[in-house]
Image: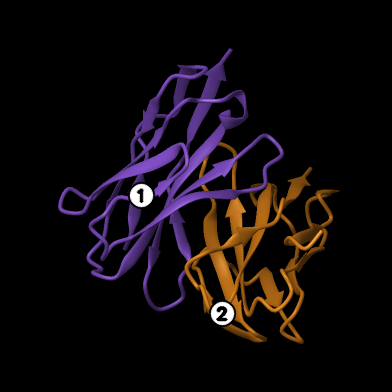
Amino acid sequence: AQTVTQSQPEMSVQEAETVTLSCTYDTSESNYYLFWYKQPPSRQMILVIRQEAYKQQNATENRFSVNFQKAAKSFSLKISDSQLGDTAMYFCAFMRGNPGNQFYFGTGTSLTVIP
Amino acid sequence: DTGVSQDPRHKITKRGQNVTFRCDPISEHNRLYWYRQTLGQGPEFLTYFQNEAQLEKSRLLSDRFSAERPKGSFSTLEIQRTEQGDSAMYLCASTPGRAKNIQYFGAGTRLSVL
């Protein structure tokens, strides 16, 4: 079974500052993908960033980057230059390569960006 | 709007009643997923379809739950004899066949069972 753990239920950051959200996972799979999804108060989940497990290079999307430590099964999200619109729930998710491709989500981290 | 659409957005029902939710995926997305999200938790996988075939069901999907995707386009999730424990947000997601590892989510249907 796959498990995803987010140990920070709530976090806050000053606008324009940098914040890191933690995520660890447990799996015996060798082929998998990792994701961070954002869920604003409107509740629609939006993909922030994804990482293929076979890639050693950390994924980056504008102000968002990850620190993927495969041996440690760690997948943290760094948000640089935080903006008010970053306020949301952030979910770390694991997906097996096959079959099914369903997500296994962590319990989420509520991030508040303070003006 | 070409995103994943879910209807209704909110549903209030009395215990014991049946409810049905609808999900319209992004056009031409051949995989469709249903998740359930309770307060303070991440979404939990319920079931998924590839085209019209239901390929996997979670143990969370009791006999009171049934999902269909008759023509490989929209899907319905029905809950029979609702219980208070069914109160949750029900999320639908779809995936294009060429990029199976990206799921696009709808806004969800919030169910409240009184």
Q: Nearer the viewer, residue B80 or A74?
A: A74
Q: Quadrant of the N terminus of chain B?
A: bottom right
Looking at the picture, does residue B51 appear above or below residue B112?
A: below
- Place of residue B23 in the rendered image (x, y in percent of width and height, measured from the top left): 75, 66
Q: Residue furthest front?
A: A62
| Residue at x-position 51% and y-position 27% | A111
In the image: residue A56, left or right of residue A7: left
In the image: residue B94, left or right of residue B57: right
Image hue for chain A: purple
To which chain does the residue with label 2 belong? B
| Residue at x-position 23% and y-position 57% | A56
- Place of residue B75 in the rendered image (x, y in percent of width and height, measured from the top left): 74, 74
State the orange chain: B
| Residue at x-position 66% and y-position 56% | B91
Q: Nearer the viewer, residue B104 or A108?
A: B104
Residue at mark 1: A4
The residue carrying pointer 1 sits among few (fewer than 14), some (14 to 19) or many (20 or more) residues within 10 Å by Cα, namely many
Q: Residue furthest left?
A: A71
